Image: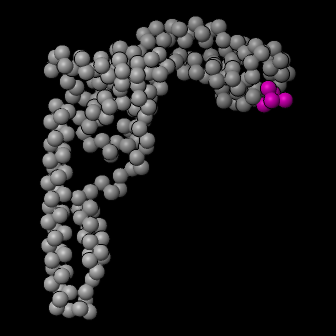
Amino acid sequence: MIIDTLEETNKRYWKKMLNLKNKLKEVLHSANQSRSRQSTESLSRQSIENHTWRESFTLFNNDHHKSFKFSNSSVFIDEDESTWDSWRVKMNNKLQTNVDHFDNENICIVYVISRLEDDAAEHIFAWRWHDASHSYILIDELFEHLKEIYDDQNKNRKCCREYNALRQANKLFNIFYFNFMKLFSYLEYDDCTLMNDLQNKINNRLQNALSICLKDFTTLHCLKSFLQSMNNR
């Protein structure tokens, strides 16, 4: 399916380019005849070519207002779960941000498969070659298949254990809070719970500073900013 799609795309491309080439010849021929009759209205061959190609590519390339094309995401080579998580986010961002560069589901599928290597690529190819009915119709089907293989089903349980054990101790607050934020992003805790937990996890010096503070913190962001400022003193 992928090869057939690419061949059809190439055929349509070269057919359009052939039409543009013929149009260019016609314009040049007409310009040469006009130049021989009226030298005062002559145009240089280069200017005619430039004008013709600008017009041709405007007709041929209706996507001249496409979005800025972001660089390709990194290649996924089947490592640990953190690599899979970050790769999946980057791929989704690429496809969503440059959606006008991916005209259909097949192009999305071909692109995503091109960003797989080693065991990850071999698994997808083997799975598809084993049974032709395994061909993907939608890009979400490919992502779901990869998720079944590489997503850690025990991630929430592991994050919960690490979150409960997390303490600032002698760490800088920014380093501690980065780990705090990374873990709670996987957990469904509200701001009130997170604020209470944060106050219990910071070191004694920041807890003392917080106890004598008369401010009423209503959001996690405000509490974090205050603790950050205290830690920098």
Colour mapping used in the image = one colour
Left or right: 184, with 131 as reference point: right
Quadrant where the N terminus is found in the figure: top left
Residue at screen point 41% across, 25% down: 76
Above or below, 5 against 232 in this view is: below
Spot occupied by residue 79 in the image (x, y as percentages of width and height): 45, 17
Left or right: 73, with 3 as reference point: right
Residue at screen point 27% across, 33% down: 110
Quadrant where the C terminus is found in the figure: top right
Left or right: 184, with 30 as reference point: right
Above or below, 126 against 34 in this view is: above
Q: How many marks?
A: 0
Image: magenta residue range: 229-233
Above or below, 77 against 64 in this view is: above
Which one is in front, 230 or 1? Answer: 1
Q: Is residue 101 visible from the viewing direction of this image?
A: yes
Q: Is residue 144 visible from the viewing direction of this image?
A: no
Spot occupied by residue 61 in the image (x, y as percentages of width and height): 26, 57
Above or below, 154 against 34 in this view is: above
Residue at screen point 23% across, 35% down: 106
Which one is in front, 38 or 133? Answer: 38
Spot occupied by residue 49 in the image (x, y as percentages of width and height): 26, 71
Q: Is residue 232 magenta?
A: yes
Left or right: 104, with 112 as reference point: left
Residue at screen point 15% across, 77% down: 29
Q: Is residue 167 magenta?
A: no
Magenta-drawn stretch, dominant element (helix, strand or loop) = helix
Spot occupied by residue 215 in the image (x, y as percentages of width and height): 78, 28
